[in-house]
Amino acid sequence: MSVKNVLTNLGSGIKEVFSGKAEKDNLFALNGRTPLKSALPFGLQHVLAMFAANIAPMIIVFAAIGVMNDSGMAVYSMLGALFMAGLGTGIQLLIGARLPIVIGTSFTFVPIFITIGLSAGGGEAGYYTILGSIIVGSGFATVFSLFYKWWGKLIKPIVPAIVVLGIGLSLLASGANQFFGGSQIIGNVISSGETGTGVPYFAYILVALATLISAIVWYIAMPGVWKNINIVIGILVGYAISCCIPGMVNFSGMAIDTNNLVGPHGVFTYPHFIDFTKLRFELVPCILTSVCFIVAIIEAIGDTIALSHSGLDREPTPRELGGAVVFDGFNSLLGSVFGAFPLTTFAQNVGIVSQTKVVNRFTIFLGAMFLVITSFFPPIANFIYSIPDVVIGGTMVILFGNIMVVGMKSISEQGWSDKNILIVALSVCLGFGVTIATVSVPTGLASSVSLFSSLGIGWLGDLLSNNVLNMFLIAIILSFVLPDSMRLFKSKEKKDGE
């Protein structure tokens, strides 16, 4: 794609999104402006649903490799991820897929990044080894995606449908985990019987239920388009209740360093470039991260197809799919210079679109700009991060369930032939099954894929722990290997009289 084509696409994208009179009905149209009183709350809904999840992968990796989450390096990295989530979403809306895509930090890379970071010694060395692998992997993904119109033809329709189902299945545990308090609260209750916050555990469940019920009741009771803002309403109600329960909301992150008002803990900051002299490029980490980028490309294809099906009632065009995967790679490459981890299309947004049918790019663009603004003002970001997991979980169980249903619907649309039934059955049972299978060991239960660690090939176990990759590989292999008729030999029919 030449610079001239990029500028042409940008110009036409801006014209489609911002031209014309602001109309309320445009909420359900891809192009055109909507009144700000409608666009702002609906746009915020798209980004609030993914806000905390946007930095969660980084928090997990930093904790595992020994980087303090409140250190300047980690904070600037997470603020860089927020900045790129907003900027990258704008790029996808105006230049890339030109679909109602929201991007954010991918969970796909977490196991591999922990392995890479620890192998490099952890800390700063581990962090810059990870960043080096991101630069190589995202560059590979961008170039590879440029040829989508050729290799994309090899992917048969049943495969992306299974990938969408796989994405939905992969998110179910996360949604349920948040609904029941989040990893830290659940872990504290299991180990000590207490939440560790002084708040009774039943209070967390009640808040999650209140959030869920509020979102459902609002959706049922409200007339017109405003019923579709139920996710924001559920979060607002849940957060208001949480603030009334002493100890449930942690406000410590909103403390401001009055001695350094410009900085990661001050009132204002700005995206910082990484120290390029510390980057480490090692062969094995670069290869592993590049493989994970292939998984991310497949997920992006699945998300884009699901988004188009659920929001636009049509198949995405080759140009839309190609734009989605190319600029996913480009956004990750650009984000790495700000210290961000790989960014890809966010499945939470697919869930929102499938429920609300709000696909307007102008509306989502305003939400994207909110993400950019929060990256310059840490107190705003920290305020949103203070929303408890149970509040987010109370709405995520709706959205994540919707993604799985979209996948099931997409599979159904391909037809239930003997071949498709077998592909789906094996993809789910083997591809998803291996990630949830456990074995009994002296210390308790362990995942079956941990077997590879004991064999000295833990990186393979990290890859196989991703059910989306497993289901994709099984589905694409079977789609070529299995005959369409599911018969190797044609039986001869007896003629009359024989």
Image: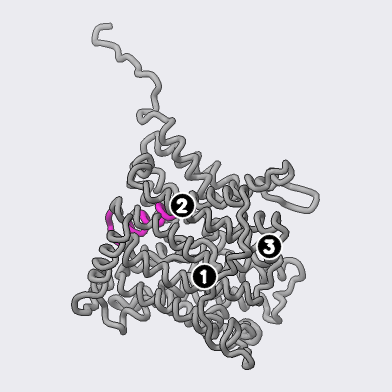
SS state under label 3: helix
Q: Which residues fall within the magenta stretch?
A: 296-314
Is residue 63 one of those drawn in magenta? no
Can you tell which quarter of the image residue 191 is in? bottom right
> At label 2, which amino acid type do we have?
Ala
Q: Which residue lies at the image location 30% right of the left edge and 70% below the top edge?
A: 360
Label 1 vs label 3: CA separation? 20 Å
Ranked by sequence position, the earlier of labels 1 and 3 is: 1
Q: Which residue is mark 3?
A: 125
Whether the residues at callouts 1 and 3 have beta carbons within 8 Å, the answer is: no
Q: Position of residue 181 (x, y in %)?
A: 61, 71
Residue 88: tell me if it is visible. Answer: yes
The C terminus - image quarter: top left
Foreground mark, 3 or 2, reads 3
Say few, some or many: other residues with alpha carbon within 10 Å of mark 1 (under 14 / 14 to 19 / 20 or more): many
Q: Is residue 8 left or right of residue 403?
A: left
Say few, some or many: other residues with alpha carbon within 10 Å of mark 2 (under 14 / 14 to 19 / 20 or more): many
Residue 81 is labelled as: 1
Q: Which residue is mark 2?
A: 141
Q: Is residue 420 above or below residue 101?
A: above
Can you tell which quarter of the image residue 60 is in? bottom right
Q: Which residue lies at the image location 37% right of the left edge and 76% below the top edge?
A: 43
Q: Is residue 395 above or below residue 163?
A: below
Q: Position of residue 475 (x, y in %)?
A: 46, 40
Label 2 vs label 1: CA separation? 19 Å
Residue 145 is labelled as: none
The N terminus - image quarter: bottom left
Q: Which is more toward the observer, 309 or 393?
A: 309
